Image (cartoon, grey):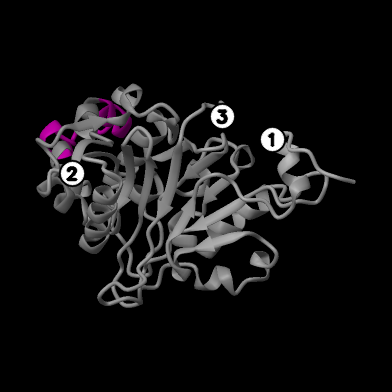
Amino acid sequence: MSNIKNTFKVKVLGTKGYEGEGVSNHGDCIIVYDEFNKTMILYDCGSEQHAENVIEFMESKGIKQTDIVLSHNDSDHFDGILRLIDEDKVDKVFTTLLLKYVDNILDILDNDSRTRKATKKRILDLYDNIAKLEGNNLKDIYFDESELPVGVSLVGPDEDTMLEAVAKAIKENDIQTSDGSETVVNATSLQIAVTIEGGRGLLLLGDAAVENVICKFSDYWYVQLPHHGKKASAETVLESIENDDDDGTAKHTFLVSDNTGNTNGGSVALMDSPISVGVDIRNTKDGNIEIGMPSYATVKSASRDYGICYGT
């Protein structure tokens, strides 16, 4: 991705100190903010306690309103958004407004017995949380990506992949399973890239299925492991990236937003797996994750990126 100069920093919220910590599923809430310009974009907000934390954060930084990218419809990515809207903290919400594409979806379904009205109703059933946001400056990210802040961009899935997935979900009566596995709906989470302070790339994946990620993981210094660090998805990401550069210094940092409480999802199996040994994985189970200017273990590693002088 391009090396756009900006002052974005990132804070991935954990649940340390939350009421019901370790029990309730608070889901994802990732703050991308520019202190200097007083701007912010929020990637998902999965609980009211997250929303309260976001409001406190915005007030501390003097940020009046935030844009939101809602990756997908699931409650553990949505449930704090209405609270933020009620408190007048939201400017625009970017997500997938699929009713605009009902005719395209009908063409993919290619079923003469399925009516347009029934298809619209099924879309509203599958994306019921998004429907609740009607009237709150909703933006279809495929139409309105240009309104995202400079340094933030949509990287996937592409429009065709999204519409094919929706058609499949309608055909298969897609519902969330009790074990927290990916459904067609959450597997097509909107994936965004952010160029953070220092010029390094961050890739945010929500609950995306790895096969729906069309960019190269290795293009990004920071990568959110999808679906709250679910082991199978994370292993695919980790195995696809060459973790070391030519001088043996780790090149990638992986972020796990695991606030899943006592559900069957999450990162426990990953963190216990041999594949995580020696890999730089930061997990919200240990508290908030904060990313700003990169830190370096040695002056030599800093010189590689920024030309800082060092002795022999």
Q: Distance between the residues labelled 2 and 3?
A: 30 Å
Q: In the image, which residues are magenta?
A: 104-119
Asked whether residue 207 is in view, the answer is no
Q: Mark 2 points at which residue?
A: 89
Residue 126 is situated, as x and y percent measured from the top left of the image, at 22, 48
- Between discs 2 and 3, the one toward the N terminus: 3
Label 1 amino acid?
Tyr
Q: How far apart are marks 3 and 1 (CA)?
A: 18 Å
Q: Mark 3 points at which residue?
A: 1
Looking at the image, which residue sits at the far right?
Answer: 312
Horizontally, residue 68 falls left or right of residue 244, namely left
Residue drawn at (47%, 37%), measured in percent from left and top?
A: 193
- Between discs 2 and 1, the one toward the N terminus: 2
Residue 156 is situated, as x and y percent measured from the top left of the image, at 44, 35
Q: Do the residues labelled 3 and 1 touch (CB within 8 Å)?
A: no
Q: Is residue 8 magenta?
A: no
Asked whether residue 248 is in view, the answer is yes
Q: For this rendering, which residue is in front, 93 or 307? A: 307
Disc 2: CA contacts within 10 A as few (<14), some (14-19) or many (>=20): many
Compared to residue 164, the image places residue 184 above or below, namely below
Q: Are marks 2 and 1 in contact (CB under 8 Å)?
A: no
> Of discs 2 and 1, which sits in the foreground?
1
Label 2 amino acid?
Lys
Disc 3: CA contacts within 10 A as few (<14), some (14-19) or many (>=20): some
Horizontally, residue 54 falls left or right of residue 288, namely left
Disc 1: CA contacts within 10 A as few (<14), some (14-19) or many (>=20): few
Q: Mark 1 points at which residue?
A: 306
Q: How far apart are marks 2 and 1 (CA)?
A: 37 Å
Horizontally, residue 306 falls left or right of residue 58, namely right
Q: Is the magenta stretch mostly helix, strand or loop?
A: helix
Provide the secondary structure element on which disc 2 rests. Answer: loop
Residue 204 image-quadrant placement? top left
